[in-house]
Image (cartoon, grey):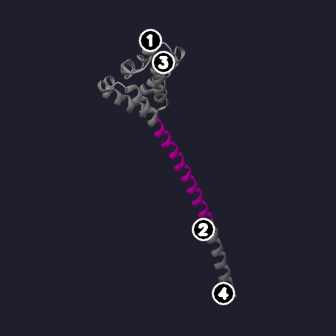
Amino acid sequence: MGFWDDVKEKISNTLIEIKKNPYLDIVAKSALENIPIIGNILVKVYENAPGGEENKIEQIVQLLQNLEKLNTESLELISREIKNNENLLINVHDSLTQLTDETSLIHERLEKQNENFIEIKIGQTEIHLDVLKLRKEQQKILDEVKDVGDNVRLLMRK
């Protein structure tokens, strides 16, 4: 298991822990700290987020769910962006909301790309099948032409 797979596992474990105690601010902070690279940043973003504990916990759960759904490459890119923009994220009052919204959009885009990829694969398969049908028809026509040619040669010999 790779490092980013471990990060995804920690995110999943954090989600489970927070969902067990959805109204305990201290549990959310403690669980977030266990996420490699971005955990401490998320704690600070969580602490600085506006609103009450319940609202902040809902947002952090949504953010974690979004991160959990990403493939490891996307998770790595987002984690690096979070790390690279740590000071900005900590100092902007609504960073939690922005991160939640952005990760939702990223997840939606990745889902759309995956759907497009599947449609392309289906299209390629259909084209391949059409090419095979055309080759079969071509061979059938060639065989018929050969038969006609053979018949013409027989007639010419007579």
Q: Going 40% across and 20% down the picture, which residue do you hit?
A: 46
Q: Which residues are magenta?
A: 107-136
SS at mark 3 in the image: helix
- Please tell me whether residue 22 is drawn above or below residue 147 in the rendered image: above
Query: For this view, does 142 lie left or right of residue 27?
Result: right
Q: Position of residue 24 (x, y in %)?
A: 48, 12
The label nearer to you, 4 versus 2, is: 2
The amino acid marked with disc number 4 is Met
Mark 1–mark 3 CB contact (< 8 Å): no
Q: Which residue extends farthest front?
A: 51
Q: How many marks?
A: 4
Reading the chain from its start, which is encountered first: label 2 or label 3?
3
Q: Going 31% across and 23% down the picture, which residue do you hit?
A: 91
Gap in angstroms between the C-alphas marked 2 and 3 = 69 Å
Q: Residues within 10 Å of mark 2 (few under 14, many from 20)?
A: few
Q: Residues within 10 Å of mark 4 (few under 14, many from 20)?
A: few
Q: Is residue 118 magenta?
A: yes
SS at mark 1 in the image: helix
Q: Position of residue 74 (x, y in %)?
A: 42, 34
Query: For this view, does 35 lie left or right of residue 131?
Result: left
State the residue position of label 2.
Answer: 138
State the residue position of label 1.
Answer: 26
